[in-house]
Amino acid sequence: MERGLMWLPLLGAFIWLARAGATEYQKIEAYKRWAVGFDRCKYDIYAVMGLKDREISWGKPTKAEPKNLRTFSLDRINKIQLIVDNRAVDLDDLPVKGKKIDLRFESIDPTAESIEIPFTEVPMAAEWAKFLNRSIAKSE
C-alpha cells in the first residue's frame, strides 16, 4: 500500500506532462492552419507572426487559432530594433540569451505607440530584425 502511494505523485506528473504536450500540439496545429497564407512566419510560445507582402500580422497562439491578432504595414514603420532585457541590442554583437526578448517596430508617426512582438530566442529575433530591416531599406 505504501509503495503505491509513493508512485502516485509520479503518475500525476506523467498525466500533467501528457496534457501539456497535447495542448502544445494543438497550438502548433492551429498555427499551421493560420500560417498557410503567409510568405514567412514564426511560431513560439509567446507569439505567432506572419509576413505577407509588406503586412505583418501577429498574435498569441492558442489551441483554436491565434487570438489578439493585430496587423500593421511595414510602410508605416521607420525603425526596427531588437530589445533584450529592455535594452536595444546591436545586431552584430548579440547577447547569448535574455529574459525578455522583443522586436520593437517604431512608427513613422511620432505620436504612434511602438509595437513590440515577443520572442523566445535571441538568434531567431535577430534573424527577423535583419530580414525586416532589409525589407524596409529596399522600399526607400
Image (cartoon, rainbow, N blue to C red):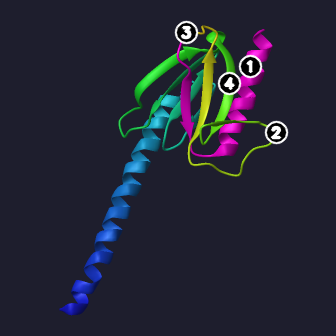
Q: Secondary structure at mark 3?
A: loop
Question: Visible in this render: residue 94?
Answer: yes
Local crowd at mark 3 within 10 Å, few (<14), some, or many (≥20)?
Answer: few
The earlier-in-sequence mark between 2 and 3 is 2
Name which residue type carries label 2.
Asp
Pinpoint residue 90: horizontal percent, then vertical percent. 77, 36
Amino acid type, residue under disc 3 in the picture: Thr
Residue named by callout 2: 92
Q: Nearer the viewer, mark 4 or mark 1?
A: 4
Give the residue number, with chain letter if any, for mark 3: 111
Quarter residue 69 falls in: top left
* Distance in Å between CA atoms under marks 4 and 2: 14 Å
Check disc 1 and report the residue beneath it: 135
Name the front one of labels 2 and 3. Answer: 3
Residue type at mark 1 is Ser
Which image quadrant: the C terminus? top right
Q: Which residue is mark 4?
A: 80
Query: Mark 1 Cα within 10 Å, few/some/many (few <14, many 20+)?
Result: some
Instruction: Report how far apart the C-alphas of labels 4 and 3 lie in the structure.
Output: 17 Å
Instruction: Write down the region rendered in magenta.
Output: 112-140
Give the Cα distance between marks 2 and 1.
Answer: 18 Å
CB under 8 Å between discs 2 and 1: no
Secondary structure beneath dot 1 equals helix
Give the mark nearest the N terminus, 2 or 1.
2
Where disc 2 sits, the SS reads: loop
- How many marks on residues? 4
